[in-house]
Image (cartoon, rainbow, N blue to C red):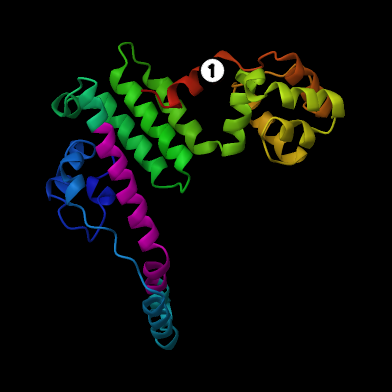
Amino acid sequence: MTDCATLAPAGHQGWPESLASNPTATSITVHRMADQIDDYPQRHAADTGAEVARIAVSVVPFGGSVSRLFDLVFTPSIEKRRSRWFDELADLVAQLSADQVTPSQLSDDDEWISAVDKASRVALGTHLDEKIAMLKALLRRYALAVDRDEFAVSRFIRLVDELEPIHFGLLRLSREPMAWASRDTLDRAIQQRVENLDDVLRVFGIETDQPTAVAAVRDLEDKWLVKMPTEPNGDWFSHNLLAGEPWILATGREFLEWVEAFE
């Protein structure tokens, strides 16, 4: 399990030492500290320029300046990601408390803590708010689940990591093709007789080019999330979208159900 010392934002005021010494505190203790965390200190342009200048004039053998440059460029972003994710975990614990799942119950739930650990690795590696929201929804559902499937949840966490927004859009489209279109967009699609995949997807609100869309659909099929009867092309998409027939598989449908937010 990831050591909480590697997750706790360095330099923050108010983070207890227990976060570094008690791994199960990753998602529990944090919510008590949420209102004590100072705003993340912003580096001003003048500070950055001065530091870069110091690095430029102090280049030494064996990578000494490289380490300082890494601290300058990457550390602030990494620390902000940690802070953001801990804030999300704090809110998640509050939501679960409202769901009648207490912090003490969560701290004793080894399966859930393991899922938090896996999700945290993904959360710290992304800048996409959509993925953060998906991980948060998944962890909430897992905490509330009666019949748990640890393998499935671990796989869903990996899918959040491996897939990109274009995949998520196409997967939702494959579940409910007609839900993506108003009567107006359907009329325009029919009138235009669009056969180019770019145009077809654009009608349904997905901005991408044909090679990217085809590659994304094949990714989804390789992961057993969708099943297409033929090779993806403009004509195939036109026919299936306008017919409104879902082309999502059961695993894809279950994945979306787990990662979509709910009240």
Q: From what the image shows, is residue 62 above or below residue 183?
A: below
Q: Which portion, as a residue range, is magenta?
A: 67-93
* Residue drawn at the location 43% of the way across and 31% of the way down: 157
Residue appearing at x 39%, y 80% in the figure? 46
Is 208 placed above or below 147 here? Answer: below
80 within the magenta span: yes
Label 1 element class: helix
Label 1 amino acid?
Arg
Task: Where is residue 141? Give x, y as percent.
Answer: 35, 22
The residue carrying mark 1 is: 253
* Mark 1 burial class by Cα count in 10 Å: few <14, some 14-19, many 20+: some
Answer with the quarter of the image where residue 146 lies: top left
Q: Can you name the residue that lies furthest to the front here?
A: 184
In terms of image quadrants, where is residue 149?
Answer: top left
**Residue at left 46%, top 38%?**
131
The residue shown at (25%, 39%) is 90
**Residue 76, percent across and down?**
36, 62
Q: Name the spot of residue 210 as percent of width and height, x first.
A: 77, 38
